[in-house]
């Protein structure tokens, strides 16, 4: 099961390093833009671009409590067939 705020933390940390690929088992990896990663032959559920999602927040705490960002992450994962919960 994926956790929304954990993904936001990983997005925050990935800023400036690349995009964030997220798999259904909860793993995530920073990847180069345009890269098509696989883990054990499976594509990620989603690939997020950190800067447009979290760079506008002055502190991580603001990002992890922003309702619109939380809902966007959750909708993206659910639409891809994954399970996610807000922790």
Image (tube, grey):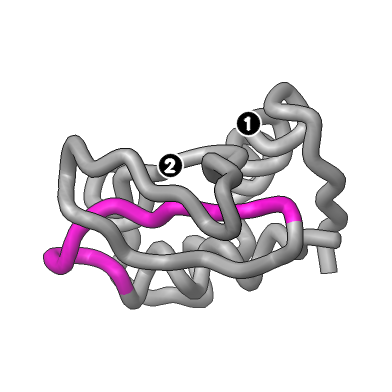
Which of pointers 2 and 1 lies earlier in the amino acid sequence?
A: 2
| In this view, the mark in front (2 or 1) | 2
Front-lying residue, 61 or 11: 11
Q: Which residue is mark 2?
A: 47
Q: Are marks 2 and 1 in contact (CB under 8 Å)?
A: no
SS under mark 1: helix
Q: On the rendered image, what quadrant is the N terminus found in?
A: bottom right
Front-lying residue, 55 or 17: 17
Q: On the rendered image, what quadrant is the C terminus found in?
A: bottom right
How packed is label 2: few (under 14 Cα within 10 Å), some, or many (20 or more)? many
Front-lying residue, 40 or 6: 40
Residue drawn at x 28%, y 52% is 19
Which image quadrant is residue 78 in? top right
Q: Which residue is mark 1?
A: 76
Residue drawn at x 33%, y 76% is 13
Q: Is residue 36 magenta?
A: no
Residue drawn at x 23%, y 51% is 51
**Which portion, as a residue range, is magenta?**
14-24
């Amino acid at each position: 099961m994926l956790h929304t705020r954990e993904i936001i933390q990983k997005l925050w940390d990935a800023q400036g390093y690349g995009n964030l690929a997220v798999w259904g088992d909860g793993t995530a990896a920073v990847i180069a833009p345009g890269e098509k990663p696989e883990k054990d032959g499976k594509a990620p559920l989603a690939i997020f671009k950190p800067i447009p999602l979290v760079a506008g927040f002055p502190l991580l705490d603001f990002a992890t409590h922003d309702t619109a960002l939380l809902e966007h992450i959750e909708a993206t994962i659910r639409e891809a067939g994954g399970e996610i919960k807000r922790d």
